[in-house]
Image (tube, rainbow, N blue to C red):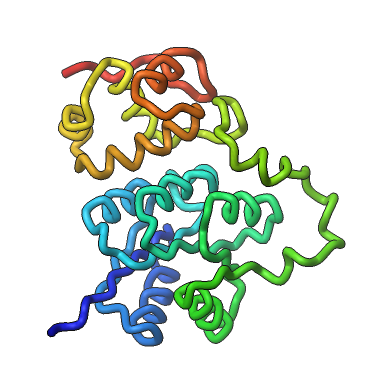
C-alpha cells in the first residue's frame, strides 16, 4: 500500500523565506507536497480544499492575518493539522495570543536552520514549542498585560481589539443580506469550505454560535466596518 502523502502549507509574504522553510519540510520531514501562500486568505482557501494537510505554518505580518486570533478558526476547522507560527515578532503579547489561539508552536525567524528544525521536530512530534524568551521575566511589564487565560479563552465581543480581515467582512456583509454559504461562495468566487472557515472566525469575533446572531451583530456598528455593503448581485 502506498504511504499517505504528507501535505504542508507555508504562508508568508516573503517568497525567499517560503522557499527556505519548504526545503526544510521536504528534506528534513519528508513532506511530499508543500503549498506556498502569500496571504492569509490564500492560505485559508488552500486548507479548505486540502483538509488532509498535516501542517500549516503562518507568518503574523502577512496580508490578511491582522491578529494571531485568526489562527483559532484554522485550528477549529482543521484539528488534525499541526499549526505553527514563524514570525519576526518576539512580542510577548503576540506569542501569548498565538498560543491562546491554539497553535502548536511559535518560532522566531531569527532561529538558525538547525534550531528551526529542532523546533519543528517538537511540533510535529506532538509537543508545543515556546520561545525561550517567554520565560524571561525581565520583559514582563514592558508590554500591556493580557487578561487571565480563562477570560482570554471566553467568547470575545466585537471591539476587543481584534479586526476582521477584508475577506471576512465581505462574507459578513453577504451573510447580513441573507445569503447562504453556497451563494456567498459564488459571489466571492471562493469554495464553500473557505466560506465556512471565515464564518467560524466571524462567529468567534462576535462571540456568537449561529448565523442569525452573527447577522444581527454584524448589522450593528463594529470596528472598521465598511459602510457600503456588497451588492446582492
Residue 85 pos. (x, y %): 51, 61
Q: Is residue 55 above or below residue 39?
A: below
The N terminus lies in quadrant: bottom left
Q: Is residue 62 above or below residue 123?
A: above
Residue 177 pos. (x, y %): 27, 15
Numbered label tally: 0
The residue sitting at 33% across, 50% down in the picture is 44
The residue sitting at 60% across, 68% down in the picture is 108
Q: Left of 214 or right of it: where is 68?
A: right
The residue sitting at 55% across, 86% down in the picture is 114
Residue 70 pos. (x, y %): 47, 44
Considering depth in this image, is 111 or 217 the residue closer to the camera? 217
The reply to whether residue 167 is visible in this rendering is no
Considering depth in this image, is 15 or 76 the residue closer to the camera? 76
Q: Left of 167 or right of it: where is 93?
A: right
The reply to whether residue 30 is visible in this rendering is yes
Q: Is residue 81 above or below residue 69?
A: below
Question: Residue 90 appears in which quarter of the rendering?
Answer: bottom right
Residue 155 pos. (x, y %): 55, 33
The C terminus lies in quadrant: top left
Considering depth in this image, is 166 or 144 the residue closer to the camera? 144
The residue sitting at 20% across, 34% down in the picture is 185
Q: Left of 21 or right of it: where is 156?
A: right
Q: Is residue 110 above or below residue 141?
A: below
Q: Left of 24 or right of it: where is 46?
A: left
Amino acid at each position: 500500500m502506498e504511504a499517505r502523502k504528507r501535505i504542508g502549507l507555508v504562508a508568508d509574504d516573503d517568497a525567499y523565506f517560503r522557499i527556505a522553510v519548504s526545503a526544510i519540510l521536504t528534506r528534513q520531514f519528508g513532506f511530499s507536497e508543500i503549498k506556498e501562500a502569500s496571504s492569509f486568505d490564500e492560505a485559508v482557501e488552500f486548507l479548505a480544499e486540502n483538509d488532509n494537510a498535516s501542517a500549516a505554518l503562518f507568518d503574523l505580518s502577512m496580508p490578511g492575518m491582522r491578529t494571531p486570533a485568526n489562527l483559532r478558526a484554522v485550528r477549529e476547522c482543521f484539528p488534525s493539522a499541526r499549526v505553527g507560527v514563524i514570525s519576526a515578532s518576539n512580542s510577548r503579547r503576540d506569542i501569548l495570543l498565538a498560543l491562546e489561539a491554539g497553535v502548536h508552536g511559535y518560532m522566531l525567524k531569527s532561529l538558525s536552520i538547525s534550531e528551526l528544525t529542532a523546533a519543528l521536530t517538537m511540533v510535529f512530534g506532538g509537543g508545543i514549542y515556546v520561545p525561550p524568551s517567554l520565560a524571561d521575566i525581565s520583559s514582563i511589564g514592558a508590554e500591556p498585560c493580557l487578561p487571565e487565560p480563562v477570560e482570554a479563552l471566553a467568547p470575545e465581543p466585537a471591539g476587543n481589539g481584534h479586526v476582521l480581515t477584508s475577506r471576512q467582512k465581505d462574507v459578513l456583509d453577504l451573510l447580513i443580506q441573507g445569503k447562504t454559504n453556497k451563494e456567498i461562495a459564488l459571489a466571492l468566487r471562493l469554495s464553500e469550505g473557505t466560506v465556512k472557515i471565515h464564518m467560524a472566525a466571524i462567529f468567534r469575533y462576535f462571540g456568537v454560535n449561529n448565523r442569525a446572531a452573527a447577522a444581527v451583530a454584524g448589522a450593528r456598528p463594529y470596528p472598521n466596518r465598511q459602510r457600503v455593503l456588497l451588492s446582492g448581485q
